[in-house]
Image: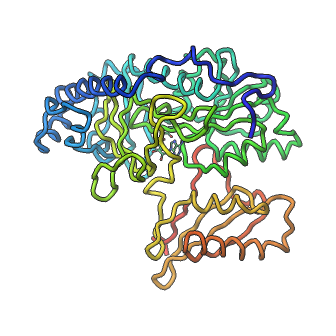
Amino acid sequence: MPGLTLKGADLSPRKQDFDPIEVASRDEISALQLDRLKWTLARVYDNVPHYRQAFDKAGVHPDDMKTLSDLRKFPFTSKSDLRANYPFGLMAVPREQLLRVHASSGTTGKPTVVGYSRRDVDTWASIIARSLRAAGCRPGMLAQNSYGYGLFTGGLGFHHGAEHLGLTVVPVSGGMTERQVKLIGDFRPDVIFVTPSYLLAILDEFRAQGVDPRASSLKIAMCGAEPWTNAMRDEIENAFDMHAIDNYGLSEVIGPGVSCECIETKDGCTIWEDHFYPEVVDPGTGEVLPDGETGELVFTSLTKEAMPVIRYRTRDLSRLLPPTARSFRRMDKVIGRSDDMFIVRGVNVFPSQIEEIILADARLAPHFVIELRRTDRLDDVIVVVEARPNVAEDVFGACERDLSGKIKSLIGITTAVRAVKPGSIERSMGKAKRVVDLRRKL
Ligand code: DLL
């Protein structure tokens, strides 16, 4: 694991740079959250017809919010509410006061649209700046931004956050992998903003060009936008001799900047609880679970002006953990999205479980897809995984048998494994698609 002094730079946290609330007492944080929740609930009730109707239907009023636990009386918001109010129906300000909109592509028709006022754009930049600082970034560092620019929140979100902190930003966006490597060599960035799966494609390109990634100037990778395991972190950190820092967010809640790991602990993302109120609920019943129990993450925005969200169901599975490096609670690594979970003969399986097993085998590379097919009304799971470049084809059979055996014993499902040559699996430029569901087509 890389140290806090790396390639000549001091990346250790400087307490004098923390926002006072990052080190405040729990009582101070709770008092701030309660004030901000009251403000947010009143704001949506007065300005957004959807919320007024939903609150009235549930028989609750913003005045019922007296202690933090009263939040659970309020109804959830889901992606379908955003779709039903497409495009601007959930805004609490007139359209003319939106400074920016983003949208997520959405696989089933209408995209979900989110809007930001001037104040929201500033708030967003300041919490991404806070995230970058937690990750070890300092003013004056140079950042290569390889998140996609456009409707996706990753590119522009990180761009403004990095400028806010005082970094020099190279707005490369995703894609043109050869050029990514060339620019890293020429501009010597300290930090890269990128999805972990695209970072692996950049790593391939380093190797294809015969350039040593460990000798690169990179010290920090801000990796997020998709689930990834600690085994993948080790892979990236060893390959580049840099820190790979997890950071989490979603467009409906603001974009990146909801939570971020601190470089000194790397023990899950610290949630910026002064801006987002987290809950974890049972995905089936919606009941609020105690801290430490795994369920679906739900967020309520505390400071958003244009498009506040009340109890937004993320579909991401994780659990809340006690504070460590800061006074805020943390979230455990996201196991996966409930949409990515597949059920095989009653067993719930996430791609991240398979990723972890693959990475424990030194012969296998972190490039894989899981195909689901249906034969004779039974579901077949086929794991297609690349071998590492130095592995001879005559051991592919043994790799396949070993991986299938480990998946059976550790997860309990039967899979057919197909080992393939390096480079056979399509690389993503943004979020990787790990599960290909071919069942409906058969
Ligand atoms: O992916 C925002 C983002 C951009 C976060 C860049 C971090 C870095 P969406 O496109 O709306 O927003 O997708 C949000 O991505 O609900 C999770 O399922 C997944 N996700 C985001 N960050 C992580 C992470 C951006 N660190 C959806 N770990 C979320 C696991 C993540 N999953």
Looking at the image, residue 184 sits to the left or right of residue 38; the answer is right
Looking at the image, residue 75 sits to the left or right of residue 372; the answer is left
The quadrant where residue 430 appears: top right
Q: Residue at x 48, y 24 (%)?
A: 127
x and y, in percent, of residue 236 in the image: 72, 44
The quadrant where residue 355 appears: bottom right
Residue nearest the viewer, comparing 374 with 409? 409
Q: Residue at x 71, y 76 (%)?
A: 401
Residue nearest the viewer, comparing 339 with 430? 339
The quadrant where residue 196 appears: top right
Q: Is residue 167 above or below residue 335?
A: above
x and y, in percent, of residue 190 in the image: 73, 26
Residue nearest the viewer, comparing 273 with 385? 273
Q: Which quarter of the rendered picture does the N terminus lie within?
A: top right
Q: Residue at x 67, y 55 (%)?
A: 426
Q: Residue at x 45, y 82 (%)?
A: 377
Color theme of the render: rainbow
x and y, in percent, of residue 308 in the image: 31, 30
Looking at the image, residue 354 sits to the left or right of residue 80; the answer is right
In this view, the residue farthest toward the right is: 210
x and y, in percent, of residue 250 in the image: 45, 39
